[in-house]
Amino acid sequence: RKQVTRDYGSPQLSKKRGGAHQPLPLTEVVEPVDFEEYVSSHAPGVEAGPLRQLMEFPQDDLELLPLDKECTTLEPPLPEEEEDSLDPRVRDALAVYTDDWLVIHRKFQHYSTTYTPQNSERQRERQRGLVKQTFELDEAAVHDRQDDQDDSKRRSVSLDETPRGSWASSIFDLKNSSPDALLPSVLERTAAEDMDRNNMEARSQERHSDLLGLYPPPDEDEAVERCPLPEVPKEHCGQRIMVKCLSLKFEIEIEPIFGSLALYDVKEKKKISENFYFDLNSDQMKGLLKPHTPHIVISTLARSAIFSITYPSPDIFLVIKLEKVLQQGDIGECCEPYMVMKESDSSKHKEKLEKLRLQAEQACSRLGRFRMPFAWTAIHLLNIVSSVGGLDRSDPDSDSERKSHGTWNERKKKGFERMSVGEEMCNFGTFRPATLTVTNFFKQEGDRLSDEDLYKFLADMRRPSSVLRRLRPVTAQLKIDISPAPDSPHYCLSPELLHVIPYPDLRVRPTKEVLEFPARNVYTPHTTYRNLLYVYPQSLNFSSRQGSVRNIAVKVQFMAGEDPSQALPVSPVQRRT
């Protein structure tokens, strides 16, 4: 940079090209020359010189390398319409999700000042197996300590023979001291070339091959220039957990009961995952709904789900909701038989149970497509991680040993988002698998169906004196497994119900990946085509309506265009008002 400034001048330092040299006063602050800006504004043109190649952009620096895009599913993530029937602009837009990558590789980037090949991981690799270096300063300190110890010993020995402070003590020290080693050839004349060669050989003895590699890397937070190598775009994935629903049993069996799982963040007051619906009913109970389900899709038979958690925190709950077929009457009246009756007392309540089964059969035949809330419960995920315990860091299966240190952007992001002590314990990717039997189900209150009410209940569950203890429980037993999700699970379906590789047999009961709704934005590109629309009716207010309370079913349809025949029906959802 100094040589270029002297050859071509600088608008801040001289007026070489414009006229006579005009020195600047010493009191004026001179900004350093921006090399790139000056070269771009003062092209050398036809001027020749030894530094011209430094100003010209190398013609062979850029290299385009094709990279195959990895498809994680058996089917390409594209719309179901035929490619020829799509609009050309839509077809070109969708090609972004299927075309291969084109990587721009810079051959000479490693010569740039912004490229830093040193990192903490490479430093540890280079320092393995190195002999501990002992420097002269350390040896001198060791000798000084030894000399002090020897002096104290000699003084203690000679105290009886000679008085302290007398001239004889110095003579005693001189007699016992050893002379310094003589320097060979100190008075001989040696040629400068021989001296340089001897010094070079001495420096090469036991010298580390990568001496500069042992120097600590520069702090990336304080770097003036930064040009990291970009990574290949990929879909974001947080810490993943797998939940398997094994069985659901009640004291009495009179009708089919359906369940759903979802993750909620109490601190953010936000639902952070889509619902996962599971059906653990017996074949006899499923037969009551056969007229409404002539064909069963295998994806609806899933009993295990994989949830992704981008921001682990101690405020995340796994909420389990149970639903039943819509029937006449208040929700509390529908739950009453499950709280007072038992199958062991079938002889005592035989007639009543038969009546309830008959009513449930009639409701299934008439309203089998509609659901109503029944009961709910929640599992605090932090209790699962803390009670079971995390994996040992020495465990080869631990994810912490396989994860890389991440790019500068990832480390910078983690630096800005410092977790609290409780959040550092929430590592949902390395805890031991656990099998739970959930028995504390709470009756769904008819006037508390909103998410705001649910957040209050979840906050009360974390307190020792919870108000939920005063609620009457619904007797049930739900057995589930919670474990870290494997890296490549078999028989897994994506949120778009696409078969994730590997999928050996299409007839096996699948596992569903549940789409995550992160509590905060995640700034990553979308590399997969995702055509999903989630509609959640929040509330339906009939407070001004006079008369008795009735069950009301709300049906939602998504209108595609202006043609009513193109309406896409959504499964009816019932809410008690």
Image (tube, helix red, strand yellow):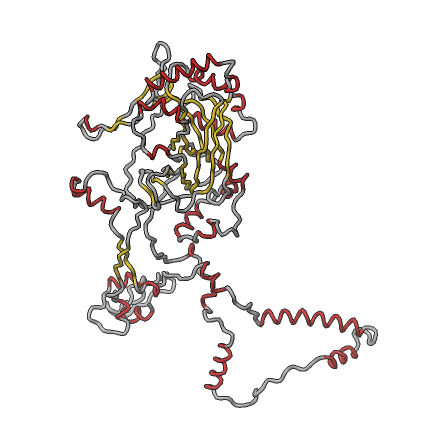
Q: Nearer the viewer, residue 100 or 200?
A: 100
Quadrant of residue 327 within the rendered picture: top left
Residue drawn 56% across and 70% down?
135
Quadrant of residue 265 within the rendered picture: top left
Task: Point out residue 518 in the picture as x, y percentages from the top left corner.
Answer: 38, 38
Residue that protrudes farthest toward the top in the picture: 547
Quadrant of residue 268 within the rendered picture: top left
Task: Point out residue 206 in the picture as x, y percentages from the top left corner.
Answer: 51, 74
User: Which image quarter is the N terminus in?
Assistant: bottom left
Q: Nearer the viewer, residue 499 or 62?
A: 499
Image position of 9 with respect to 427: above or below: below
Could you tell me how many numbered marks the image carries?
A: 0
In the figure, is residue 119 to the left or right of 547? right
Q: In this rendering, does residue 456 appear at all? A: no
Q: Nearer the viewer, residue 549 or 388?
A: 388
Image position of 291 with respect to 508: above or below: above
Q: Nearer the viewer, residue 364 or 309?
A: 364
Task: Point out residue 261 in the picture as x, y percentages from the top left corner.
Answer: 41, 32
Q: In this rendering, does residue 469 appear at all? A: yes
Image position of 477 with respect to 207: above or below: above
Residue that protrudes farthest toward the right in the picture: 160
In the figure, is residue 77 to the left or right of 427? left
Residue drawn 77% across and 79% down?
172
Image position of 148 with respect to 31: above or below: below
Task: Point out residue 176 in the picture as x, y percentages from the top left corner.
Answer: 74, 80
User: Which image quarter is the C terminus in?
Assistant: top left
